[in-house]
Amino acid sequence: MNYQKELDNLIDKLGTEQRRPRLFIHSCCAPCSSYVLEYLSAHFDITIFFYNPNIHPEEEYIRRVEEQKALIKAMPLKSEVQFMQGEYHPLKYYEQIKGLEQEPEGGERCFVCYELRLREAAKCAASMSFDYYTTTLSISPHKNAEKLNEIGERLGKEYNIPYLPTDFKKKNGYKRSIELSKEYNLYRQDYCGCVFSRRDRQNQDEV
């Protein structure tokens, strides 16, 4: 399925209706959200939701939160963007991925992590009567856009909140995020966020 085409069609429809829906966006980090904000702020009233209990260590989590806040303030966006921070409970992440610690990066452990974060986003978006919710995660070439959309749509039906179909890496989205990261001098981490991706990165550096 071409998720980018679905999104383009939806945006075209909103344009003809001359309305701006409220969109709740789960964000994994400032660099990944940069292009997404630039792209979607012209069409939606956005709240960025930073919920990432997978991030290790806590110092890394705090740094990513502060980078996200700083980016929202710095970018000259089409409309004001709100920021909401979820609770940081790493034990919740470890409980969810128990037994999957040795899974390769990009496998089943990551899918469980996707669902953990998207479930919280869907639940919050529904409780605050947003029109749509989505995530910045699909901008990464290392993330499975098909799986993200599958999980997002399923949870959207469960919580009665439409999931905005996305594959933000399309239309040079990932490339643009790198350009914006340089423009705003963003901290661009070299691992996904969890202790396992950090371990794998360190092992690669030692080879």
Image (spheres, rainbow, N blue to C red):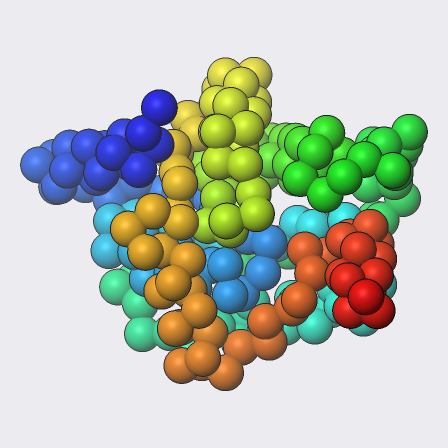
- Residue 9, above or below 184: above
- What residue sits 27% from the left and 30% below the top? 6
- What residue sits 70% from the left and 33% below the top? 107
Image quarter of residue 195? bottom right
Q: Where the N terminus falls, by quadrant?
A: top left
Pick the front one: 138 or 19: 138
- 61 sits left or right of 114 in the view: right
Q: Residue furthest front?
A: 207
Do we see residue 37 in this rendering? Answer: no
- What residue sits 48% from the left and 44% below the top? 138
Do we see residue 75 in this rendering? Answer: yes
Pick the front one: 164 or 143: 143
- What residue sits 28% from the left and 51% below the top? 171
Image quarter of residue 17? top left
- 15 sits left or right of 6 in the view: left
Image quarter of residue 131? top left
- 81 sits left or right of 106 in the view: left
Pick the front one: 58 or 97: 97
Q: Residue 29 in the image: state x and y as whole percent.
A: 58, 60
- Residue 20, above or below 131: below
- 140 sits left or right of 164 in the view: right
Q: Residue 44 in the image: state x and y as whole percent.
A: 30, 48
Q: Residue furthest left?
A: 16
